[in-house]
Image: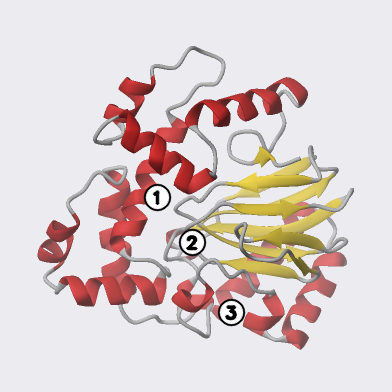
Amino acid sequence: MEYVSRVPRPPLDGLIDDLYYLEGAPPYARLMLPPSPSALLIVNLGAPFRIRAGTDIETAEYADGCVVTMPTRAFEFGYPPGTRSVGGHFKPWGLAPFLPMPAAELCDRPVTVEQVWGRSAIAELRDRLAAAAGPYEMLTLLEEELMRRLCETAGLGLVRHTSSVIAAASGAVAIGDLSVAAGVSSTHLAQRFKELIGVTPKRLARTWRFTSSVFGINPAEPIDWGDLAGGAGYFDQAHFGHEFRAFTGLTPTRYVEVRRRFLREHPGHVLDGWPLPAD
C-alpha cells in the first residue's frame, strides 16, 4: 500500500495530527481498530468500505467516506480489494469546528461525510480530488476545504487545554483536579467535553492510558505484564487485563499474538502498529 501524510498548516495543526493519502490492497479484508484518543475523517475515492462499530451494531457501508468522533469501543473496518482515500487523523477535539452537531451525537456512530457536509459538497470535493495530479495535490485540496469550513467553536480552548493535560500525563490524572485547575465545575467540563469530543474527561483519560500501555508493548520481545501495567498507572495486572478486554475484546496475551501475526505475515507494512487482522 502507498501511504503519504503530512501535518497541515496552522491553524489546522492545532486540530489535526496529519492529513493522509492511502491507496492499494489492504493486508487483510477486515481490520480491527482499538479505540484511541483520535477522531477520523475519510473521503473515499474507491469502492465502498464497511464499518462495524461494535459487536452489537450491524455493519454499514460507506461510499463517500465517513466521519468518526473519538471511539469508546473497537471498530472493524472492511476494505475492498483495492482501496483509495484521503483523510485526516484529528486530535480528540479536532472535528468539533467542522461538525454541525454535538460530537456526542456521533459517539460510536460513524456517519457518512454527506450526513455532515451535504451531498453536493462532498460530491464536488470527491470530483476535485479524483482529478488531482497526485497525492500531494490531493492533500492540499483537502487542507483548503478544511480551512474553508473552519468555524469558531465555543469552549474549544477549555477542552483543548484540559485534553492536553490529560495527554501529557498519558491519562494518569485525577479527574477532579482538572476542573479545579480549569476554574469550572466538573459538570460544566464534562458537558463541554461531550459536546466537542463526544466523551467525558474520565473516558478520554482511560483511552489515553490504554493507548500508552499498548505503545509500550514491543511484540518482538518478552513482556513483563506487571511492569507494563504499573508503568501505565493501573492498580494491578488484573485491572490492566480488564481494561484491555474492554477496549479490544482481547486479553493482553491474545493481543500480542495477533500483533505478531501481522508482523510475521506483513513485515514493514504501512498499517502495522495499530490495526489488527480481524479475519
- Inter-mark Cα distance, 2 to 3: 23 Å
How dense is the environment of label 1, judged by Cα within 10 Å: few (below 14), some, or many (20 and up)?
many
Q: Are marks 2 and 1 in contact (CB under 8 Å)?
A: yes
**Residue positioned 42% across, 28% down in the render:** 216
| Comes first in the chain, label 1 or label 3 | 3
Residue 188 falls in image quadrant: bottom left
Specify the label residue 207 is tagged with. Answer: 1
The circle on residue 148 is 3
The kind of residue tagged 3 is Arg
Distance between the Cα atoms at labels 1 and 3? 31 Å
Residue 231 vs 277, above or below: the answer is: above
Q: How many marks?
A: 3
Check whether the beta carbons of the residues at disc 1 and disc 3 lie within 8 A of each other: no
The mark found on residue 182 in the picture is none
User: What's the residue type where badge 2 is placed?
Assistant: Met
**Of label 2 and label 3, which has the lower sequence position?**
2
Q: Is residue 189 left or right of residue 78?
A: left
Label at residue 70: 2
Tell me the distance, in whole angstroms, between the alpha carbons under discs 2 and 1.
Answer: 10 Å
Q: Position of residue 6 (x, y in %)?
A: 60, 49
Amino acid at the residue labelled 1 = Thr
Mark whose residue sits in front, 1 or 3:
1
The picture places residue 229, in percent across and down from the top left corner, at 33, 29
Picture residue at 69% right of the left edge, 74% below the top: 112
54 sits left or right of 130 in the view: left
The location of residue 203, given as percent across then percent down, is 35, 58
- Label 2 vs 1, first from the N-terminus: 2
Q: Quadrant of residue 119?
A: bottom right
Dot 1: element = helix
- Which quadrant of the rendered structure holds the C terminus? top right
Residue 219 spot, x, y in % from top left: 55, 21
